[in-house]
Image (cartoon, grey):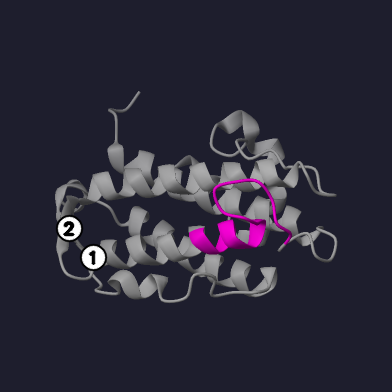
Amino acid sequence: MSAFDPMRVFRKLAYNNALANTRLQRACVALQPGEFEARRVSFFPSIKSTLNHILTVDWFYVDALEGGTLGLKAFDIDEPFDTLDALSMEQSKVDRRLVILCQDLNPEALVRVIDLHRGNRIQRERAEDVLSHLFQHQTHHRGQVHAMLSGSSVAPPQLDEFIVADDARFRGEELAALSWDETMLMR
């Protein structure tokens, strides 16, 4: 058995994130007209608002992790996308960026200090802490969308069957949608 590898952990979290987003978006495609934007009880008032929030926060943090200076411009528009198709396409793009970033991690990259441009100040954090926060944020808000789906015409999908080997039988559609295969997830 090999030694613990934190780069592998973050890589698998990035894979899990992309797979879960893909599954959640595929479920949302089945919503009836009006359900995507319908007012619901949650931190954000709709599925549309919550998915847009996940996306804009991803833009903010992934850009910073890549060394960018997008900063608060990521939030210039609260809900940049009105349709699930457009939102899903942009979420897939940022998910791919995060996967690439995590595939390229090394011990030095994990401990490097990231500048988070917060308007009138620069917040400085270690990359591993920013990544941990980002994955927690995504999981938290996906859970809210999952709960909101319970009050819609669409059954909430299983969102935690992705990373362990025994769950391979459940992730085929998502792997195909992402053009991935099992060997990628097991590295």
Hey, what amino acid is under mark 1?
A: Arg
Q: Is residue 133 left or right of residue 154?
A: left
* Secondary-structure class at tag 1: loop
Residue 101 locus on image (x, y percent) = 34, 59
Q: How many marks?
A: 2
Question: Which residue occupies the foreground of this view, 106 or 119?
Answer: 119
Instruction: Classify the position of the N terminus by image quarter.
Output: top left
- Is 51 a magenta residue? yes
Q: Quadrant of residue 57?
A: bottom left
Residue in the image at 35% along x and 65% along y: 60
Residue 12 locus on image (x, y percent) = 44, 43
Q: Are marks 2 and 1 in contact (CB under 8 Å)?
A: yes
Q: Tell me, yes or no, if residue 171 can be seen here.
A: no
Hey, what amino acid is under mark 2?
A: Gln
Residue in the image at 80% along x and 43% along y: 155
* Secondary-structure class at tag 2: strand
- According to the picture, the residue beneath numbered tag 2 turns out to be 123
- Is 57 a magenta residue? no
Q: Distance between the Cα atoms at labels 2 and 1?
A: 7 Å
Q: Which residues are magenta?
A: 38-53
**Residue occupying the far top of the picture:** 1
Residue in the image at 85% along x and 60% along y: 32
Q: Quadrant of residue 98?
A: bottom left
Q: Is residue 155 above or below residue 112?
A: above
Instruction: Classify the position of the C terminus by image quarter.
Output: top left
Question: Which residue occupies the foreground of this view, 157 or 74?
Answer: 74
Q: Which mark is residue 118?
A: 1
Residue 90 locus on image (x, y percent) = 54, 71
Residue in the image at 50% along x and 58% along y: 54
